[in-house]
Image (cartoon, rainbow, N blue to C red):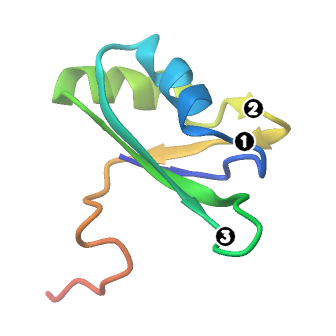
Amino acid sequence: MFVGHLPEDAKEETVREWFSEFGTVRSVRIASDVFSGKCRGFGFVEMEGHEARAAIAGLNGKTLGGKSLKVQFEDARSAGKKRRR
């Protein structure tokens, strides 16, 4: 899943805690700035399908760290690539 609008101080452990409320979290990857090490505002979380849907329903739009999270299904390998029709 793609997770956007993460706070600047977001850490993988914190994001894992948020999502583990809805099921088993396989992995968390937070995009961070190369120089400062701070969160760039987005990341990816891997969970089972039904647990991921519950996490999306529970966290999408929820205000955490002063920002309204954006949580949706997204394949990390295709992120940033344009889709062909």
Q: Residue at x 46, y 23 (%)?
A: 19
Per the image, label 1 sits on a secondary structure element best described as strand
Q: What is the x, y in percent for residue 45? A: 38, 41
Q: Which residue is mark 1?
A: 68
Q: Nearer the viewer, residue 82 or 26?
A: 26
Q: Is residue 63 above or below residue 5?
A: above
Question: 10 Å neighbourhood of mark 2: few (<14), some, or many (≥20)?
Answer: few
Outermost residue on the left side: it is 85
Mark identifier at residue 63: 2
Q: What is the x, y in percent for residue 63? A: 75, 32
Q: Which residue is mark 3?
A: 33
Indicate which disc, 3 or 2, sits on the residue closer to the N terminus: 3
User: Hey, which quadrant is residue 23 in on the image?
Assistant: top left
Q: Residue at x 20, y 22 (%)?
A: 50
Q: Are marks 3 and 2 in contact (CB under 8 Å)?
A: no
Per the image, label 2 sits on a secondary structure element best described as strand
Q: Nearer the viewer, residue 44 or 63?
A: 44
Per the image, label 3 sits on a secondary structure element best described as loop
Q: CA distance from mark 1 to mark 3?
A: 21 Å
The kind of residue on which mark 2 rests is: Thr
